[in-house]
Image (cartoon, grey):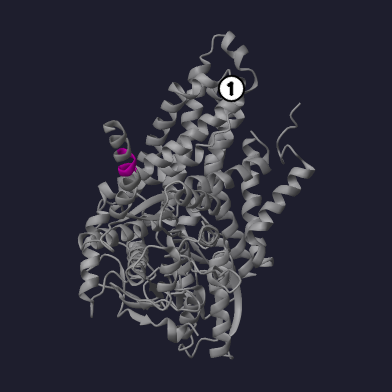
Amino acid sequence: MIRRLMLSAIFVTAGVLPFAASAADTIKIGFPMPLSGPAAVYGVPVTKGAEIAVAEINANGGVLGRKLEILSRDSKANADEAVRVARELVLKDNVDFLSGTLTSAEAPAVSTIAKENKIVFVAPVAKSTQLTAPANLHPYIFRISSNTDIEGRSGASIMAKWTDVKRVATIAPDYAYGRDGAGAFVARMKKLRPDIEIVDQQWPKLGQSDFTAFITAQMGAKPDAVYCDVFGGDFVTLAKQAAPLGYFKAIANRLVDGGEVGAVDEAQALGADYPYGIWSDAYDPVIWPVGEPPEHKKFVEQLKTGMKSEYGSGWAIQGYSAIVAIADGIKKAGSTDSDKVSKALLGLTFDTPVGKRTINATTHETESGEFWGQMVKDDHYPFATIKDPKYYDATVYGN
Amino acid sequence: MALLFGQFVGGLTTAMFLFLIASGLSLVFGVMRVLNFAHGSFYMVGAYLAWQVVQWLAPMAGSFWVAALAAALGVALLGGLAERFLLRHLYGREELYQLLFTYALVLILGDVAKAIWGTQQLSVSRPAILDGGVDLLGTTLPFYNLFIVLLGPAIAIAVWLGLTRTPVGRMVRAAALDREMLGALGANVGAIYTGMFMLSSFLAGLSGALVTPIESIVPGMDVEIIVEAFIVVVIGGMGSFWGTFLGSVIYGQVLSFGILVFPSFSIFSVFALMAVILIVRPWGLLGRPIR
């Protein structure tokens, strides 16, 4: 009798315990990101931004009484690898949500995993409009970043104001992001300024190590101004090779770059070699001399400590925002059930250190513009900073 | 006209940078029959070392040149150690083992560089003495590019003279032809191999250091460059030193004028060229058919 009681007690506890444990368990968010190879330059700070958000939310008691946990994986900036780790995160680690991915190759691939498994996926960085195009849209995919349309159109609206510019050239990396971005720029530019002629378009590959021939060919077409989507380390290379060839001088530094080279990351890498005077954008200006929101100041301080870096990164905000969106979605839904959260995310407005952002209920895209401005010398820093970063609102420039 | 000249010089710059890197790869394959995948990693380590030394010496005049030399010597030492203590044990075995070993080096050096220097892109400014440029035929020729365009052939000629006109060079060529016979005649083949591997690593480290003023230093630059280096070695003929030189020049010009003619297919033209050459001459332009 006693034995039987004990046995049933064990069964009961065994049956109840996992349930009790899961209630107090963490809410797991799978986060595939390039943590090796050239793309790690961004993958690492974006992941760091996400970790800061998680630490902050957990310090305030978590969500629905449960703590958040990030499961960070290396996607190697490769669609196949991103799919492999995402599948493993869903099937083996039983994550509740997916976020992460950097490139416009990885994100659409992981989106299919999210659709298959009916699990919410919030893409923090990928910009190609393809990710949320009607043919690819499903209830579980959401995007935090701006997209190539908003970016190209913002760039066009800046250049359209330069009335003496008649001949325009573009240079952009030869894959989805560059083709879509330059395409959006050209389409908008033709509308805003029908008098302008597109005289040259160059398509170097992503990771191009020698831009010389592209630059001299472009200079041969004699443009007055250039729209550029070359970003990151590639932009550092481009700038260093173009300057001595007289490229920036030939266009009087009238270059608009939509590839976030206004971020402190590239400015710091180039130092005094930065082509001062060009216009560019950033997810987060990081260095914000006038009108910096207090939440932003706090975020950047945490970022500098977290990254053990003197100046932080303009990319971390994307990881941070993705986690905040997921956490607010869970709160609004009152559940971690993906179907409920996916509904809660529609039309959700959430706070980020750079201002409020709203997820559009039809497109699943965050109405997220970027900060644009001219890159100038600031005596407080040994590198270029964005002068008076201005927010180009997605609802205005995206349409 | 000015445009064509500009494209030509641009292509030549591309070519000579590529040759600096590919020359070491070609040498090691020609003499030792080792396909060194890690050559790009040595190049990357050279770039990081150069950046590091420039940081240490920062305000000093000429710090870049000291850094370039230090980086090249440092990488030569690294290559020498890798050959003497690791690669040497694999000579008698199947080529697959050497391939796997050099590939393992790629992964190890990639992670080590990431652990030491992080993932942020780094950059080195052009040395002050070569900062400007000269206008010629309507095109600006940066002094630094001119320096590389001259350095490429200089290194090619120096290596060629070394191989053909010196007793050591004669030994090296003998080692390439028949290693066992040379050993039987009493020559220290091991030392020759280590020396060649160090020379090749030196060239990799030097080119890595010299590329820093015009390129960003990022993780992954190792893999990026090794593909291009392999292309020119294959076009020129595996193991043919002048073939590599010719391959580089052709690669540079095809890329440069391909951009002018078909801007939308710039990269394609280079691969099309490689395919055509390999169909017509599977052993490369100056290579010899393998019997």
Where disc 1 sits, the SS reads helix
User: Percent x, y for residue B87?
Assistant: 49, 24
Q: Image check: B109 left or right of B18?
A: left
Magenta region includes residue B211: no
Q: Image check: B82 left or right of A24?
A: right
Q: Is residue A279 visible?
A: yes
Residue toward you, A26 or B274: A26
Q: Residue at x 58, y 76 (%)?
A: A183
Magenta region includes residue A11: yes
User: Percent x, y for residue B247?
Assistant: 65, 45
Q: Residue flagged by tag 1: what amino acid is it?
A: Arg
Q: Residue at x 26, y 64 (%)?
A: A382
Q: Which residues are magenta?
A: A10-14
Looking at the picture, does residue A382 appear above or below residue A34? below
Q: Considering the image in quadrants, where does the N terminus of chain A appear?
A: top left
Q: Residue at x 46, y 30 (%)?
A: B198
How many numbered marks, from 0 up?
A: 1
Looking at the picture, does residue A51 appear above or below residue A359? above
Residue toward you, B286 or B279: B279
Residue toward you, B100 or A332: A332
Q: Residue furthest right?
A: B280
Given the image, what chain letter belongs to the residue carrying mark 1? B
Q: Residue at x 60, y 42 (%)?
A: B230
Looking at the picture, does residue B184 appear above or below residue A374? above
User: Percent x, y for residue A202?
Assistant: 59, 68
Q: Image check: B154 left or right of B257?
A: left
Q: Is residue A223 visible?
A: no
User: Percent x, y for residue B171?
Assistant: 57, 20
The residue tagged 1 is: B170
* Overall secondary structure of the magenta section: helix
Q: Residue furthest front?
A: A1
Residue B183 occupies which quadrant of the picture? top right
